[in-house]
Amino acid sequence: MTEERTTETRTPEGNVHTHTTVVTDQPRSGGGFKWFGLLVLVIVAVAAVLIFTRMSDAEVAKDNAVAGAAEDVGAAAGQVGEAAEQAIDSVTE
């Protein structure tokens, strides 16, 4: 609700001065600060998503590297086993 209050003041010389005051019951809007806060919140959210995505990608790359190394070790062990069998076969013949 908006209300206007007008006050008249008379000086001893007879001059009249009026002063009008507007009074509202509604809270003042902090529009600029709200938009700034929302913008900061969106920027922080985007940054968090990017950081966690990159961390996840690093974990996936690390897991893939470990799996690749395990496959290489397994292949090398298979080759050692085949060489041992060939050595045993050549000795027993």
Image (cartoon, rainbow, N blue to C red):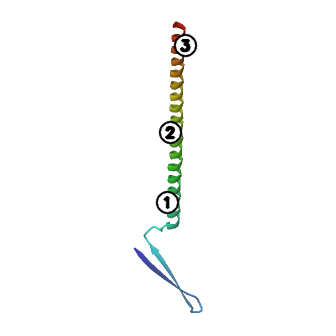
Say what secondary structure mark 1 lies in.
Answer: helix
Say what secondary structure mark 3 lies in.
Answer: helix
List the residue tagged with mark 3: 87
Badge 1 local density, few (<14 within 10 Å), some, or many (20+)? few
Residue at far bottom of view: 14
List the residue tagged with mark 1: 38
Badge 3 local density, few (<14 within 10 Å), some, or many (20+)? few
Count the marks.
3
* Badge 1 or badge 3: first in the primary sequence: 1
Quarter of the image where the N terminus is located: bottom left
Q: Say which mark, if any, is on residue 60.
A: 2
Seen in the picture, residue 80 relative to 58 is either above or below; the reply is: above
Residue at far top of view: 92
* Badge 3 or badge 2: first in the primary sequence: 2
Seen in the picture, residue 60 relative to 6 is either above or below; the reply is: above
Closer to viewer: mark 1 or mark 3: 3
Quadrant position of residue 3? bottom left
The image position of residue 88, as x and y in percent, is 52, 10
Closer to viewer: mark 3 or mark 2: 3
The reply to whether dot 1 and dot 2 touch (C-beta < 8 Å) is no
The residue shown at (44%, 73%) is 24
Residue at far front of view: 93
Residue type at mark 1: give it. Leu
Say what secondary structure mark 2 lies in.
Answer: helix
Seen in the picture, residue 55 relative to 3 is either above or below; the reply is: above
Residue type at mark 3: give it. Ala
